[in-house]
Image: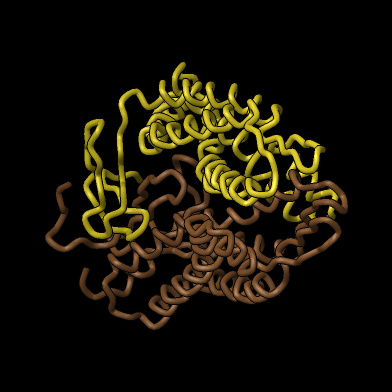
Chain colours: A yellow, B brown
Amino acid sequence: MSSNFEACPECDALLNPALPIPGEKAHCPRCGYLLQRPRQQSIERTLALSITGLILIIPANLLPMISIKIFGSSLDGNLWSGVSALLKEDMWAIAMLVLLSSVLLPIVNLGLAFLISLHLFIKKPSSHLTHWMRWLQHLNEWAMLEVYGLGIIVAWVKLSSLADLRFGLGLYAFIALLIVNAMLTIELDGYLFWQRIRQLSKKQNG
Amino acid sequence: MKRITKKLTSALDQGFTRCHDCGYLIKAVTQSSCPACFSTLHPRMPNSVQRTTALILSALCLYVPANIFPIMTVTQLGFAEPHTIMGGIMALIESDMIPIAMLVLIASILVPLLKLLGLTLLLLCVHYRWQVNARLFTRIYRIICFVGRWSMLDIFMISILVALVDMGGIAQIIAGSAATAFAAVVVLTMFAAKTFDPRLIWDHQTQS
């Protein structure tokens, strides 16, 4: 049933598999899609970065990110306060969207990346691996930490003329989390991960 | 990468199906599930054109209220002032913050509009079997997929402003009804881009 060929996901060109070495990129010759971008020690680095991310996401969520002072009264804001303020105004649809894309899905994605890379690292087969990998691929674009980061900058500029703003520790944790997240996206080699998952499930089934 | 033949053929023409989730290539076009990851197999995404059209039309309907109604109401010293998306950009320009104004203009007005137009172009191309530069059209699709999420910028900015500026009548920012419509536009266009199958552009090209 299987074949030695592969197909481009965006133009369906039938191709011979490329065997790029780490640092090289394989593009589809017909449409230019990035087929493979192998990294050195992709599994180990993904594991390390996902653990770092899971640690950083705690202070990024709990510590105040920005504190504001208007006419003598001050207020602290973190990732959750936007959600709760929107809920208070009965804007529950946006509140849910913000909650999902800035808090829940980043946690879920880091958790999934951790679970998958851990199983691949210790070479322990699991029937959940394919599901986890599929969820990670589908949910990836809905976690929008970097867009939230840009939102903080714009909000900051808008408010800076009206009020006195201070950075909180949570903001530093958030920036560190952004960097770790971006590195994780680069280091996670989906092609290799699927290959290893297939090998593991073959081993499991004898 | 070596080419198999001088002219590249599509996997479907040769009787192969690529699993959309794990990339496994199966020598069959009628099999229902992937032997490697057990997800459902389709040679092409089912009803891709119809679904994308439906999502684009819904997004287009919501794009109007998103731009007409106030996206937030700013109260300063008892004086309430509703802002539309464009009004917010104008306010940024007036206070000499041109780069940030450009950023918001691109993310919340141009990107959704260009996404809707771009996807419509791709749909027309597939429906009328236009002979086009398919490589260019695939690149348009890729750009549409990439920029989609950045439109959430305005929604995140509002959630931050609403949380931070909450001092009763002295200074308060409240999200407006356009915010929900705008968020729906962003989500619907992201789904529209996801349901569109770029392989359809290539299927009817006589030369690749």
Q: Most extreme residue toward the left, as rendered?
A: B6
Position of residue B39 measured from the top left corner of the image (x, y, whole percent): 52, 47
- Decide which of A6, A160 is in the foreground and name it: A160
Against B169, is A144 above or below?
Answer: above
Q: Residue furthest top?
A: A122
Q: Nearer the viewer, residue B188 or A67?
A: A67
Q: Quadrant of the C terminus of chain A?
A: top left
Percent of width and height locating residue B63:
62, 72
Image height check: is B32 above or below B122?
above
Residue under the point 63% across and 32% down: A167
Q: For the image shown, how many numbered marks are present on the structure?
A: 0
Residue A143 seen: no
Please give left or right for residue A7 compared with residue B154 in the image: left
Write down the quadrant of residue B191 in the picture.
bottom right
Q: Is residue A90 left or right of residue B159?
A: right
Instruction: Please tell me which residue is depicted at 35% across the width and 48% down the height of the picture.
Output: B25
Estimate the x, y position of residue B55 in percent, counting from the top left.
59, 69
The image position of residue B88, as x and y in percent, is 63, 63
- Residue visible at 22% across and 42% down in the picture: A18
Q: Is residue B139 left or right of residue B166?
A: left
Q: Nearer the viewer, residue B152 or A162?
A: A162
> From this viewpoint, is residue A159 visible?
yes
Determine the image quadrant of residue B67: bottom right
Which residue is at 27% across, 55% downward?
A32
- Give the residue at the far bottom of this rendering: B128
